[in-house]
Amino acid sequence: MTNLANIFELSTDCLPHNERIAYWREQYGHVLLRVDLEPARDVAFRACMKSLSLSGLQLFEASSSPARISRSGEYLADGNDDAVLVMNRMGIAVVSSGGREQILREQEAILVMGNEPGSYYRPNQGHSLTIRVPQSMLRSIVADPDDSVMRLIPRNRSSLGLLSHYAGWLLKAGGSLDPELLKLSARHIQDLLALTLGVTSDFKEIAKTRGLRAARLKLSKAHIVAHSHRREISVGSVATHFCVTPRYLQRLFEEDGTTFSEFLVTQRLSQAHRRLCEPDCGEIPISTIAYDCGFGDLSYFNRRFRRAYGLTPREARGEGAMLGSRVLE
């Protein structure tokens, strides 16, 4: 069990097989979600989950072997009426609530209410991402939440894809974000949730300008950081990846006080500087490091590196070597 800076994690991996089901029923089912758990009998049970509590909402990410989760009886009597958006990331899931049933395929989602008896069944290994919000909050931003309950949300709804990626990013990065950024991120999640389910007319422009644009910028930056070493990455390729126009993406960066090109170069320079200062990279030619980090022109790399760090790449490597020798001493 891990509980570090807003992130809470559970896993059965460290437990003997004969203790896993009882542990998961108690910690995940009884304490966290107020649900009952019935694992498949013919498969060894394995599960893990991660949660992040933000202002006015909770994010959950979970993977498990085949199992049925149900909310009824004593759990239903606890009075919790939170709205729950379930996003199925991998495998097949069968969701039942209020006498209705839907099959969720990968990247599809559905809204259920905590005060309705229901179940969530996985016939095989699967992975889901869940967002829980107070029903009162949902009703203030969604035009007709009752009409959205148990309606399948298709994978091609762009706001759903952004919501899923942004929530996933928060579950990875949330422990390192300061409280103000976490508050802002919670508002972005609410905005994307409203756009996914059908935003009220009063809230529509706020959600579009605040949540949608912020999520696209954050995810675009994360994509650039992950792929900055690829020389073919461009504003066009990233825009295509996120289904927006290049000009729209450029404006997002401009509103953030930078440009797409400058952000990309900064990431490449940072990666090159880090490698030049690593003792293990001491025998790798500077030109190779520059090319590996995405630069195609060595003179341009040298010029931008000196402007950014006040040193030539060779001088930066020397400083890294001196620092390494001090550490060894």
Image (spheres, rainbow, N blue to C red):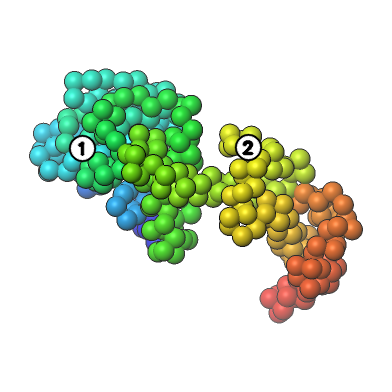
Q: Residue furthest right?
A: 299
Three-letter amino acid code of the residue under disc 1: Gly
The vertical placement of 109 against 3, above or below, is: above
Residue hosting label 2: 245
Q: Disc 1 and disc 2: Cα gap in Å?
A: 39 Å
Q: Position of residue 245 (x, y in %)?
A: 63, 37
- The answer to whether the residues at label 1 and label 2 have Cβ atoms under 8 Å apart is no
Residue at 67% in and 54% down: 259
- Mark 2 crowdedness (10 Å alpha carbons): few <14, some 14-19, many ≥20: some
The front one of 236 and 38 is 236
Q: Position of residue 202 (x, y in %)?
A: 33, 44
Residue at 26% in and 34% down: 145
Three-letter amino acid code of the residue under disc 2: Thr
- Mark 1 crowdedness (10 Å alpha carbons): few <14, some 14-19, many ≥20: many
The vertical placement of 60 against 156, above or below, is: below
The quadrant holding residue 115 is top left
The answer to whether one can see residue 287 in this image is yes
The front one of 317 and 257 is 257
Question: Left or right of 50: which side holds 305?
Answer: right
Q: Position of residue 239 (x, y in %)?
A: 63, 39
Q: Which mark is residue 156?
A: none
The quadrant holding residue 302 is bottom right
Residue hosting label 1: 114
Q: Position of residue 273 (x, y in %)?
A: 74, 63
The answer to whether one can see residue 132 in this image is no
What element does badge 2 sit on? loop
Residue at 59% in and 37% down: 244
Mark 1 or mark 2, earlier in chain: 1
Residue at 20% in and 37% down: 114
